[in-house]
Amino acid sequence: MEAPKKLVGSVAGCADDTLAGLVACNPGLQLLRGHRVALRADLDALRGRVALLSGGGSGHEPAHAGYIGKGMLSGVVAGAVFTSPAVGSILAAIRAVTQAGAVGTLLIVKNYTGDRLNFGLALERARAEGADVQMVVVGDDCAFTTQKKAGRRGLCGTVLVHKVAGALAEAGASLDEIVKRVSAVTKAMGTLGLSLSPCSVPGSKPTFQLADDEMELGLGIHGEAGVRRMKVMPADEAVETMLAHMTDPANASHLPLSRGEPPWVSPEPPWGTPCTSKEVGGGLHSAHCLAGASVVLVVNNLGGLSCLELGIVASAAVRGLERRGVCIARALVGSFMTALEMAGVSLTLMLADEELLGLIDAKTTAMAWPNLVAGPAVSQRPEVLAPNEGPEPQAAQQAPSAGPGTKRVQLVLERVCSTLLGLQDKLNELDRAAGDGDCGHTHARAARAIQEWVRARPPPAAPAQLLSALADLLLEKMGGSSGVLYGLFLTAAARPLHNRSDLPTWADAMDAGIEAMRRYGGAAPGDRTMLDSLCAAAQALHALRSPGAELLTVLASAVQVQGWGGDRGWAEWDGNGCTGRALSAPCPPGRAQRRRQKPPGTWKLVRAEPATSARPSCCSLTPGRWRRRPCCAPCWRGCGAEGGQPACGCPPLGSLRLRRRWEMRQHAPSVPSECLWSPKVGSVSVLVQRGVGWWDLGLGGGGWSPCRGGEIQPALSVMAGEEGSCWATHEPSSLPRGWLGKPGGSHGCAHGVWRKLQKGGKTGTRGPGQSLPCTTG
C-alpha cells in the first residue's frame, strides 16, 4: 500500500510549517527563534503569575498550540509528527517564560513515555538553573480493563486540564495550588476513542488497517491498538457501547458515575502530588460520584469525521448520559485533539462541581477554545412556536364546498397528476442526459402529494386560493429546487388573481409567475430550463387580452407552443457572444434540439427525432398553431425569379432545378410568405442578428439531407437577402456573390422549409405567423 496523499510542502518540515502558519494568522502568538516553540506574544503579562507550558508530537492539531492565550497556555513545545519534542526546545521555553517574570512554571504532559522522559529531563535541568518548575502528567484513557504499569494514556482530557490550570493561573493561584487542583481533576475524568479508519504520518503508510465493515474501540491518538474491534453500527449503538465501557465497574480504568464507587486513582506517581478521594475536584466525590452526577462532556473529532457525523454522535451522547441520570453541565463539540486524518470520535467526561465549572467558563483568548454559552446540555429543549401565518382571505377561511367549480378543479388536477406519473420514467431518462436523472421521481412525488390532497378534501375553486395551496403543498412535499421554483411561480401567479380572475388577469398571473422564477432562480429564456416552455406559453396567452378571445383556442395554442419552448426564442450576436435565447419554429412531428456554443454557425445538435410521417405535406405558419395540408402536385409554378404564386405549396423532394434557380439570383426576390414548403416534416430555424442582418442558422436538410438510419446528415448553410427577406440554400459552396452565407450552419434530421421573414420588430419573441427584419450586411 502506498502512502496516502497529504497536502504538505515537505514531509520533514510539515511540523514547522503548520506552527508557522498558526503564528502567521494569530497576532497573539510568536515563535522562539531556533526552536519549534510558540509563545504568547504578551509574555510581559506573565510577570507575577505562573506560566503554563505543554506540548508533544505534532499531528494532534489544534492541540496544543491552539490553546495558547490569556486564560490558558503560555507556550507550547512541538515535536515532529507523533514524536516527542526535543529536550533543548523544552528547556528554551522554560527559560523564556522564566525570564519574562513568571513566578513558576507548570509543565502539562500527556502520559506517553517519550513525553514524560523529555519534559522530565528538561524540568531537572531547569531546576538545576534555579527555576521553579513542576510537572503534571495527564492520563485519562478509559479503554483498558486492567491496570497498566505505565498508567492511563493521555488523550483529549488534557485540553480540559489546560483550561482549568489556565483559569487558575490567570486568577493568580500559586504553582503548588494549581498542581494540587489539576492533579485531582485528572483522576476525575475519562476518555474513550472509537475509530472508523487509520491515520498515516506524512510520507508513511497507515499505522494500522481496518476492514470496511469494522470499527475499533479504545485506540490511542497515535494509532495504538484499542481493546476490541467491532462491526460498524449506527451512531446510537456505537455511543452506547462507548458509555457502557467507560462506566463499567468491571473496567479498572472506568469513570465512576454511581453511588459508593471511589474515583479511579493510580499509585502515587513520582512527578505529581498524592491524591485522595476527598481531594478529587475539590470535593467532587461526595457530591457527584453517584446517580445525578454533573459532568463536562467533550465530543472530540479525531480528525477525519464529518461535522454532520459529529453532531449525530453528540446528540446520542447527551441522550445516553441522560438515561444514566447524569447532568451534562457543559458540552463541547468539535476538534480538540486529533490524530491526523483518523475518521473517529472520542468522548471525554469530567466530573464537575460549581467551582470547577467556573474555571471552565472563565474567559480565554486561546483560538481553539470554543466560545461557549454557560449552561447545561439537554436532549429536549423547549421549542419556539412558529409565528402564525398572516390572515387568510375570508373566502379561504370557509371550507370549500364540492360545487361544480371544485369538481372541475379536482378533475383537472387528477388528470395532470396521472400524466406526470405516467411520464416518470421518460422524464428520468431525459434528465439523465443532462442531470442526475431524478426529474421523473421529483415530479411523481409532487403528483402523489397532490392526489392525496385533493382526495382528502375538496380543493378550493377560487384561483388565488388554489394556486397558493398548491404552492405550499409543493414546497413541503416535492423537495429540491423544483419544489421551490414551482412554489415561487404559483405564489407570484396567485397575487394578481386575488381580486379578479378574468381572462386578461390569467395572462398577468402567468407573467408574474415567470418573473418571480427569473428574479430568484437566476435563469433566463434560452438557458434550456422550464422557463423556455413557460415563456412560449405566456406569449400565446397574451391573446387573452384581445377582445373576443376564445379561451379554449388560446389555451390550446399555449399548450402547443410550450412544447416547442426549448427550441424557440431568440439569440443576438453582438460580436462578443450570444445573449437572449434561441429562436426556432419547429414543424412537428420531428424536431432537432440544439445547444448554443459560441458564434452563429456553431450550433451543435444534441438530439434529433427522426421523421415519423412518410407522406409529403405542407406546413403553414398561422397565428397560434401549425396547419398541415397535403401537397396537391409535385410541381412549383412560377415561384422563384418571376415572383409568382405556388400552385400547391410543395415542390417535389430533391428538386435540384428549384434549388439552382434560387442560387442564380443575386438578391432574394420578393415572394409571398405562403411560398414555403416541408417535404416530410418540419424544420428548426435559429435566427441570429449580426450587424444589421438576420441569419437563419438552423434549417434542416430537406429532401437533399435525409436522416438515414438515425445518422445525422449535414444540412444547409444560410444567407440573408435584401428588401426584408431571408432565404436559405442547401449548398454553402454554391453561394453566389452578393449573398451573406455561413458554412456549416447546422446539422439535423429535420427537413427544410423555404421561408420569407417579413420586416418586423427587432426585439421580443417570434411566434408562428410573426416576422423579423432581414437586410444585407
Image: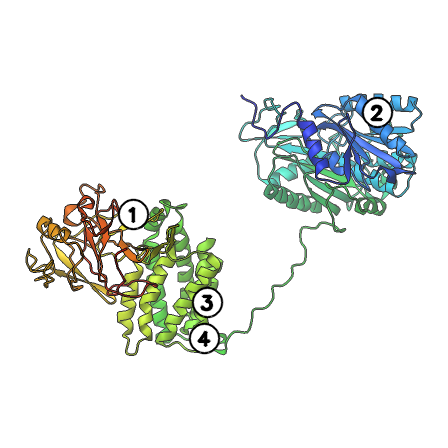
Name the secondary structure under disc 2: helix
Q: Earlier in the sequence, mark 1 or mark 2?
A: 2
The residue tagged 2 is 91
Sequence-wise first label, 4 or 3: 3
Q: Relative to the observer, which residue lies in front, 541 or 115?
A: 541
| Circle 4 residue | 498
Nearest to the observer: residue 254 or residue 596: 596
Q: Is residue 769 left or right of residue 422?
A: left
Left/right placement of residue 454 relative to residue 155 reads left
Q: Amino acid at mark 3?
A: Ala
Identified by mark 2, the residue type is Leu
Mark 1, other Cα within 10 Å: few <14 / some 14–19 / many ≥20: many
Marker count (numbered): 4
Where's the C terminus, which quadrant? bottom left
Q: Secondary structure at mark 1?
A: loop
**x and y percent of residue 8 in the render?**
61, 29
Q: Nearer the viewer, mark 1 or mark 2?
A: 1
Question: Where does label 1 land, which residue?
Answer: 601
Helix, strand or loop at label 4? It is loop
Residue in the foreground of this view, choosing between 121 and 213: 121
Residue wearing tag 3: 492
Cα separation between marks 4 and 1: 47 Å
Q: CA distance from mark 1 to mark 2?
A: 75 Å
Three-letter amino acid code at disc 4? Answer: His
Question: From this viewpoint, is residue 490 visible?
Answer: yes
Q: What element does badge 3 sit on?
A: helix
Marks 2 and 3, how far apart in space? Answer: 71 Å
